[in-house]
Amino acid sequence: MKFSSRTTTWTVALLSVVVMTTASACGGGSGGDPAENGKVSIVFAYWGSDARQKLTEEVIKKFEAKNPTIDVEGDFSSWDSYYEKIATKVAANDAPDVMSIEIRGLSEYAGRGALADLSGKVPAADLDQQVLASGQIKGKQYAVPTGVNAFSMVANPAALEKAKKELPEDTSWTWDQWAGLAKEISATGSGVTGAEYNFNPAFLQIYAAQRGEKFYDGNKIGMSAETVKSWWAIHQKLIETKGSPDAAKSAEIGSTGPEQSLLGTNAGAMGMWWSNQLNALTKSSGQEMTLLRMPKAEGATTGGMFLQPAMFYTASAKSEHPAEAAKLIDFLVNDPDAAATLLSDRGLPTNAKVLAAVKDKLPAVDQKTLTFIEEVKSELSPIQAPPKGALEMEDILQRNSEEVLFGKATPDAAAQKFLSEANAAIAG
């Protein structure tokens, strides 16, 4: 997923959450006392597309049918406005009872007392325990994964065929080979650009792992300046060889989602996306897409890829209806009826029994995603929630990356500036 620059706003707004300790609890957005009809009302906040909103409304109706004493108000927002709105509500002590968040925000929210500990409140025995652990901070289960995905290379076989190129052997290809293939595709005159790059920290995290380094090492950055500069060199090579659009066009494309990407508009052959975005890319392009392993750095002994929750369900620590909030989360992750509606929209289910129950109902593109995840799962590293301040990381990384690619800063100077800014963001 492409992340929004509004995450900085979220971080700033969250700083005011500390005032909650001096304010009276006012009900986690649930409206306080039960409604006049005797029902309890809770609020469920989430972001996404119109398609996700429709699916979520359907799954809420199913939950209410099974739990007639609970009304759920869906609080839907677009991606661009979601975090700013949630941060404001949390800071005002009026957080939704159930909130969707991504892994970058988990430490921030949990560390400021905004989230309830769900340990023992949401049944978790059938969930993937490795993935479940990613929702823990200091031994407490503050978040439950909605589903899983992996940051991967996506290719359009038809575009490669048009350029008279074959799909690469993804178990052994290197970044140089990827860039070379992209150059060759762009040079064929087929009207298709070989590749598009992006500044998602997941890309750099994978690349750093291939070089034996960690993106985060506690409350500091674990990468060397040489690794960051080497990573930028991949982007520079793509631009110089016309394997990708120039810096300005790439920046323009990078501010959009999968539907407006080169792959999504049939203007590109390869790009990096989360595996659960294969569906959106397929629908927008009208083409069958293929998931591939990420290329490796020369001499790498690990691919560096990791299994990550698509997002989390969390409950407000201030909710006046914690049992009902936990019951909704339980339904969303453990009930086959919920999974039959949501399918892979929030990642493939982490509940093995639920996944088995809906596996045959998954559309062909989701079956492809499942097959890929199962194929590479043994190669994927576990993931831990990054430290507080990680919400700012993409803005910091993109800003410094663009300074390099637009020629405004040397890689040496930009690498030192990136590391200094990144370390400052997560120091506390």
Image: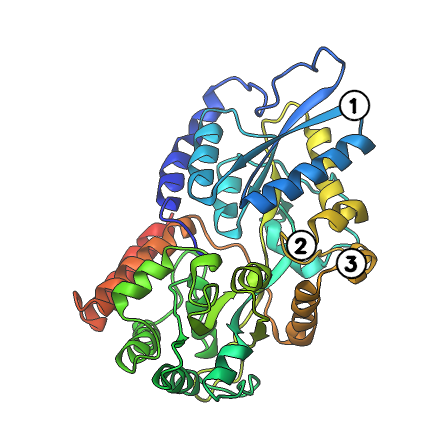
**Closer to the N terminus: mark 2 or mark 3?**
2
Q: Specify whether 251 is left or right of 169.
A: left
Query: How packed is label 3: few (under 14 Cα within 10 Å), some, or many (20 or more)?
Result: some
**SS category of the residue bearing label 3:** helix
Residue 234, horizontal then vertical, whole percent: 34, 78
Which residue is label 3 attached to? 361
Residue 383 in sight here: no
Numbered badge on residue 69: 1
> In percent of the image, x 62 and y 43: which residue is there?
313
> In percent of the image, x 43 and y 58: which residue is there?
260
**Closer to the N terminus: mark 2 or mark 1?**
1
Q: Nearer the viewer, mark 2 or mark 3?
A: 3
Q: Specify whether 224 is left or right of 20.
A: left
Which residue is label 2 attached to? 132
Residue placed most toward the observer, 57 or 411 = 57
Q: Specify whether 233 is left or right of 51.
A: left
How is the structure coloured here? rainbow
> In percent of the image, x 40 and y 66: which residue is there?
222
Residue placed most toward the observer, 398 or 19 = 398
- Vertical comparison of 86 with 199: above or below: above
**SS category of the residue bearing label 2:** helix
- Vertical comparison of 164 with 259: above or below: below
Q: Amino acid at mark 1?
A: Thr
Q: Specify whether 139 is left or right of 231.
A: right
Q: Amino acid at mark 3?
A: Lys
Q: Quadrant of residue 406?
A: bottom left
Numbered badge on residue 13: none
Residue 403 in sight here: yes
Q: Amino acid at mark 2?
A: Leu
Query: How packed is label 1: few (under 14 Cα within 10 Å), some, or many (20 or more)?
Result: some
